[in-house]
Structures are given as structure tokens and as C-alpha cells.
Image (cartoon, rainbow, N blue to C red):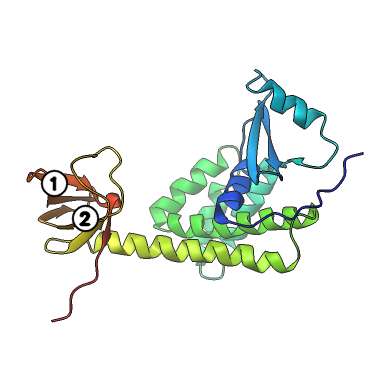
Amino acid sequence: MIDKPDKKLTLSNYILDSIELAMNSSDAEGQWYLDTGEGETLFISENYIEDEELENAIENDTSGRYILVPPKSSRENWEQMDRFTMLPDIDEENRGRLLNAISGRGAFSRFKDELFRMGILEKWYVYKGREDRKEALEWLREEELIEDSDIARGLELYEDWLHAKRKREADLTKMNTGAMVRCTYNSGHEGKITPGRIYEILEERNENLLIKIKDNNGNNKWYPKSHFELLPLRKA
């Protein structure tokens, strides 16, 4: 008999995202497990042994440390798309087009193509993110890894992440010529830009999310906007 783990899981967007990814995995050649001791997900392949010691630990676990993460069925994924079409702010014409897209084989691909043509693909991603978060939290509660009160906290973490993402995207569009930016990391550009250092934008390519700055070597070069954060305008 496998015992229920007596340790509660510490919630974070990292672990919740990992569980959601595992639930949405369509890999039929392995299984995902939640390691409640380390607070991380593990993938065990059925075709080759990557870590024999770990596989033995999972197979012989009676403490409840390793819990199989249940993958979502194709039916559950279809029902999620169907629920999206019923949102009150989707008009009847678009609803009909979406319902037609999810009829028959290849539904998910057609559904995303239709969403893109409608210009509401991002709306779907936000909706799906919330739904996936709820499902992950409900599963954790069923496994007695979180309390009822943790459900609201887990949903709040998602909304905090979404707010930060939207702010970041808004800041990227505001990285225009003359604005000041601070380097946040320099992966792939070591020695040319320095985290913490401030640079002035000389030119921008919004379609490519690139900015031209005078780098540490005095060269006017293009760098990804994602390597910087926008600084607030100075008051006169």
C-alpha cells in the first residue's frame, strides 16, 4: 500500500507550470512523476533507462514520494476548446467557425489556425493557462499535497505571472529611439553588454524586437530587447 505524502507542496509558478506541462504531454513513450520530496517533475521513458537508480526508487516507492501525474486525454483537451467557444464575448459568427474547426480529426491544429485568423490566439492561451492551472491545483488537492486554501493562492500566482508578462510585453513595445534601458542579462553577448549597465537606444526594429545601442566596445550594434528592461522617463 502506498501512503499519502505527509509533506505539503510549496506552491510556485515553476512547479505548477511543470505539472501543467506534464498533464498536457502527449508523449506515449513514458510517464511523468511528481517528486514531492524535491518539488519537481520527472520524466521516465519506457524505451531506455536514463537513471536506473531513480527508476528503481519510483518503482519501489511506498512512501508516496513519487506520484504519477495523470496525462489529459484527447477528449479532455477537446472539451477545453469547446468550453472556450462558449465564452460570452465570442460572437455567434466566430463561435460557429470555431465549432466547425474542432469537428473531426486534426481539430486542435485547425482550432489554432482559426484563432490566429480571428486575432484571438493570445486570448486562447490565457484561457487555457487558467484552465490548466485550475486542473493542476485540483489534482494536487485530491492528492492531499495542498489545502483548500492553497487553490486561491495558486490561481493568484498565475495572475501575477500574467500581469508581469503583459507589462514586460508593453515595455518591449516602448523601447524606442532615445529611451534608456538597463541590461538584465547578457547570455551570448558576454563582454559586449553588462548586466546592470544602462544604455541609450539609438534605433529600434520593433518587428524583430531588436535595439541598436553603443555597446561596451564603443560599437553601435543590434541586441535583443529581451536582454534589457525599460527605465522610467526622467521628470523634467
Q: Is residue 178 above or below residue 2?
A: below
Mark 1: amino acid: Asn
The residue at 69%/21% (across/down) is 52
Residue 142, disc: none
Left or right: 150 in relation to 199 = right
Question: What number of labels is visible?
Answer: 2
Q: Position of residue 130 (x, y in %)?
A: 58, 60
Q: Position of residue 164 (x, y in %)?
A: 42, 63
Q: Position of residue 145 (x, y in %)?
A: 75, 54
Visible residue check, residue 28: no
Label 2 sits on residue: 197
Left or right: 225 in relation to 53 = left
Q: Residues within 10 Å of mark 2 (few under 14, many from 20)?
A: some
> Which badge, 1 or 2, comes first in the chain's sequence?
2
Is the residue under label 2 in contact with that under label 1 (CB below 8 Å)?
yes
Mark 2: amino acid: Arg
Q: Quadrant of the N terminus?
A: top right
Q: Is residue 169 above or below residue 218?
A: below
Residue 216, disc: 1
The residue at 79%/55% (across/down) is 142
Q: Quadrant of residue 134?
A: bottom right
The residue at 61%/38% (across/down) is 25
| Residue in front for this viewpoint, 193 or 69 | 193
